[in-house]
Image: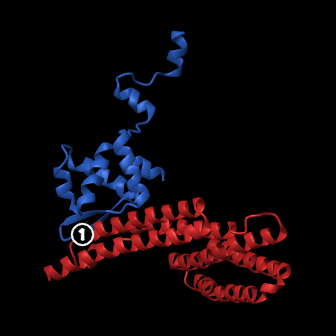
Amino acid sequence: MNRVFKALSDPTRRRVLQLLRERPLSAGELADQFPVSKPTMSAHFAVLQEADLIEAEKSGRTILYRLKMSVLEEALLGFAQTVGWDMKPRASKRVAEGGGVKHPRTVKGEV
Amino acid sequence: MKTALTRYVTPALLALGAMLTIANWYLTPERSRAWALTLAFLACLLVPLWHARRRASQEGGRRRTNDILAGAVGFAALVLVIPLSGKLAYALGAIEDGDLAKRLSMVVVGALLVAVGNAMPKMLPPPSSIACDGAKAQALRRLSGWTWVLTGLAYVVLWLVLSVDMAAAVSTMVVLVGMVAVATQMFRLWRTRRREV
């Protein structure tokens, strides 16, 4: 279940799931919808596959992705979409905000 | 490979069912025919369980199939154990509501509907084996899943809230509506498939 929460915590992955709700799509068709590099998209697909939310099938030279979500997982996706679920770890969030992670000794020295 | 389900859980439920039936027989001997039938049914359930255990020890690979078989037997035993416990508790004077056991059994059946509906969209056949439009097949599975989950939830709530007679009638209606909804979608898919051919 942890993997499912991790997969649903990212807006790009949620959008991928939303697109796959309409119909199965190829990797290229999905990648075209996002302004990110193909390796990044592949990483997102890997996370979704690891969580067993999508399934890939190779047909010729293309990889076709399709949705593999249970009703509960779909309900969780809907909930995540509604509340704008974003589960970044605290440390990386601070780094992203420009705060950085303070070394314990530095903190002690400041006091 | 034998798992906890084939090794312990299902046999324990069957043994518990047999013990409860014997206890009920002892306390209410006037219903001996019903208790004898229950014991015979529990004995019949031993056959698929024995088969699953034998297969599990022979071929280590097919763990999932054996688990499904053992799980189905375990669920059948659980559906029996709940009303048997209720009947025994009622005969011993521990509970005053004679319908409680029936209600609980129906709640378990509703929970099964929810569990099956929840898993339905995940049970995908390989895309190459789908004869019609993949998007339509996916939509049908999603609709079926949601229908059975909502039907199961309604079923559980109805059996918890309404009187037994009322719950029996209304819950049957709810299940029928769910079946009609799924059948209609299947018919629509079949019609579009015929048109495409």
Is B10 positioned to the left or the right of A35 in the image? right
Looking at the image, residue B105 sits to the left or right of residue A83; the answer is right
Height in image: B166 above or below A46?
below
Residue A103 position, x and y percent, is 49, 22
- Amino acid identity at mark 1: Lys
Q: Colour of chain B?
A: red
Q: Nearer the viewer, residue A39 or A83?
A: A83
Q: Is residue A1 above or below residue A80?
A: below
Residue B63 point in image, percent of width and height: 53, 76
Reading the image, the residue beneath label 1 is B136
Can residue A88 be seen here? The reply is: yes
Q: Please name the residue shown 23% across and 67% down the image.
A: B135
| Residue at mark 1: chain | B
Q: Position of residue B65 (x, y in %)?
A: 51, 79
Q: Residue at x 59, y 78 (%)?
A: B70
Image colour assigned to chain A: blue
Q: Nearer the viewer, residue A56 or B120?
A: B120
Q: Among all residues in the image, which is located at the extreme left? A: B196
Q: Position of residue A81 (x, y in %)?
A: 34, 44
Q: Residue at x 37, y 50 (%)?
A: A77
Question: Looking at the picture, does residue B158 appear above or below residue B63?
Answer: above
The structure residue drawn at horizontal position 75% and vertical position 85%, both measured from the top left corner, is: B35
Element on which disc 1 rests: helix
Number of callouts? 1
